[in-house]
Image (tube, rainbow, N blue to C red):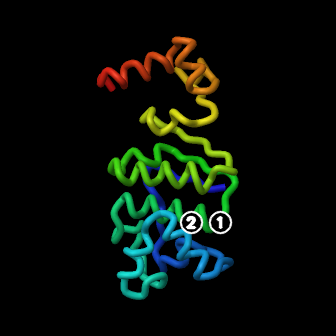
Amino acid sequence: MAVIAQDPVLFGGSLRRNLDPFSKHTDLELWTALEDVQLKAMVEKLPGQLDYQVKEAGSNFSVGERQLVCLARALVQKCKIIVMDEATANVDFKTDNLIQQVIRHKFKDSTVLTIAHRLNTIMDYDKVLILDGGRVVEFDKPEILIQNGGMFAELVKNTNEGKM
C-alpha cells in the first residue's frame, strides 16, 4: 500500500533509498519508474544520479518533484492499494495531469482511493463517494450521480460555471 499525501514525504539519504528503501529492486526498475513519472532526464543530470543525496524532507526538490518521486516509489513497489490524499493540491496543472495519467495507466489494476477537491481528478473514476458532515450522502459512478441531480451534480454544475 502507498499513501501519497498533499505534502509528499522524502527522507534524507540517497534518491535510490527513497525509491527502494529495502534494496529489493534493480537499477533498471528504478530508472523505469523514474521514466514513467518523467523524472528520468532530471535525475540523469544530478550528481551521482540514483545516489544523489536528498536533503531532509526533500527540500532540494520542488513539491511537484517530491510528489513524482513518491509516485515512482509506489510504482517500484508495485502497490495494489494507492491512497491519494489531496496529492495534487500543491502542484501545478502539468504535474497534476501527469500524476493522473500515471495513476490511470500504471495503477489500472490497483485500488486507488482519492481524496480530492478538484473534480477533474475523479470524473473518470469507477465510483465516487460524497461525504457531508462526516456522513455518506452519495455513492455511485460519477455519471449516475450527475444524472441523479444531488450534491455531486451541484458541485459539477458550480465547477462548470466557474464558481469553484
Taking the spot 59% from the left edge, 18% from the top edge, the residue there is: 137
Horizontal placement of 57 versus 4: left or right? left
Query: Can you say whether 147 is above or below 18 in the image?
Result: above
Q: Which amino acid type corresponds to the residue marked 2 in the rendered image? A: Arg
Query: Can you say whether 63 is above or below 111 in the image?
Result: below
> Which percent across, then down, holds residue 121?
47, 39
Q: Which amino acid type corresponds to the residue marked 1 in the rendered image? A: Gln
Query: Can you say whether 95 is above or below 128 in the image?
Result: below
Task: Give the Cα distance between marks 1 and 2.
Answer: 6 Å
SS of the residue under disc 2? helix
Placement of the C terminus among the 4 image quadrants: top left
Find the residue positioned furthest to the bottom. Answer: 48
> Which percent across, then down, holds residue 159?
37, 25
Placement of the N terminus among the 4 image quadrants: bottom right
Which sits in the foreground, 39 or 55? 39
Taking the spot 64% from the left edge, 24% from the top edge, the residue there is: 140
Which sits in the foreground, 74 or 40? 40
Horizontal placement of 146 versus 88: left or right? right
Category of crowding for the residue at label 1, using alpha-carbon neighbours closer than 10 angstroms: few (below 14), some (14–19), many (at least 20): some
Tag 1 and tag 2, C-beta contact below 8 Å: yes
> Which percent across, then down, holds residue 118?
42, 35
Which residue is disc 1 drawn over? 77
Category of crowding for the residue at label 2, using alpha-carbon neighbours closer than 10 angstroms: few (below 14), some (14–19), many (at least 20): many
Find the residue positioned furthest to the left. Answer: 162
Which residue is disc 2 drawn over? 73
Query: Can you say whether 67 is above or below 61 in the image?
Result: above
Q: Quadrant of residue 77?
A: bottom right
Taking the spot 29% from the left edge, 25% from the top edge, the residue there is: 162
SS of the residue under disc 1? loop
Number of numbered tags placed on the structure image: 2
Which sits in the foreground, 131 or 96? 96
